[in-house]
Image: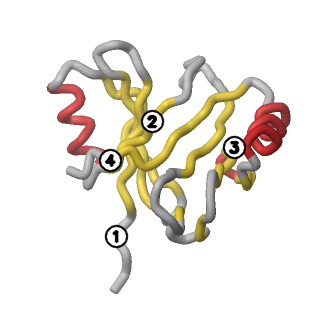
């Protein structure tokens, strides 16, 4: 299991306001994905297919706060080889699954859980590449 933090997500109540804030305050490049109701955040030089092109930073996303994801704080996303297996390990360690493994286009799979302290954390499983 990688266990590396590979992504962050920041919830918002007003998407336009949040996008204006982060692009204005930090110069982040933002790309809205209306189909997913999500905004991809690039915090540094990035390739659309592979992500950051230099070491030292990660990219993230902005999403609308909802009943399913009501948190007031950003959450981290952890890279794992299998979301399903990671969620089993989370449950065994005392955490709770919030959403099961779900596809994110053809890029990979995500799932969410709360830890023993009630923090929302995301999981990321990269889709296998065709060879």
Callout 4–callout 3 Cβ contact below 8 Å: no
The picture places residue 22, in percent across and down from the top left corner, at 74, 39
Query: Residue 37: which numbered mark, if any?
Result: 3
- Crowding at dot 3, Cα within 10 Å, few <14 / some 14-19 / many 20+, comes out as few
Q: Residue at x 70, y 28 (%)?
A: 12
The picture places residue 63, in percent across and down from the top left corner, at 65, 36
Residue at label 1? 128
Q: Which numbered mark, 4 or 3, is in the foreground of this view?
A: 4
**Left or right: residue 97 compared with residue 10:** left
Residue at label 4? 4
Nearest the eye: 39 or 24: 24
Q: Which residue is drawn at 26% across and 36% down?
A: 87
Nearest the eye: 115 or 96: 115
Nearest the eye: 51 or 126: 51
**Left or right: residue 37 compared with residue 61:** right
**Left or right: residue 69 compared with residue 1:** right
The picture places residue 114, in percent across and down from the top left corner, at 37, 23
Residue at label 2? 76
Label 2 – label 4 distance at C-alpha: 10 Å
**Left or right: residue 29 compared with residue 124:** right
In which quadrant will I find the C terminus?
bottom left
The picture places residue 33, in percent across and down from the top left corner, at 71, 53
| Pointer 2 or 4: first along the chain | 4
Label 3 – label 1 distance at C-alpha: 25 Å
Label 2 – label 3 distance at C-alpha: 19 Å
| Pointer 1 or 4: first along the chain | 4
Callout 1–callout 4 Cβ contact below 8 Å: no
Label 1 – label 4 distance at C-alpha: 18 Å
Using the image, determine if residue 13 lies above or below residue 15: above
């Amino acid at each position: 299991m990688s266990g590396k933090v590979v992504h962050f997500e920041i919830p918002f109540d007003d998407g336009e306001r949040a996008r204006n804030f982060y692009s204005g305050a930090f110069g982040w490049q933002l790309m809205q994905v209306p189909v997913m109701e999500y905004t991809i955040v690039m915090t540094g030089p990035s390739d659309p297919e592979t992500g950051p092109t230099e070491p030292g930073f990660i990219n993230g996303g902005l999403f609308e706060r909802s009943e399913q994801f009501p948190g007031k704080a950003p959450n981290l996303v952890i890279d794992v080889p299998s979301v399903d297996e990671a969620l089993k390990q989370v449950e065994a360690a005392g955490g709770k699954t919030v959403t099961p493994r779900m596809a994110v286009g053809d890029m990979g799979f995500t799932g969410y859980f709360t830890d023993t302290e009630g923090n929302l954390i995301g999981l990321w499983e990269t889709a296998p590449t065709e060879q």
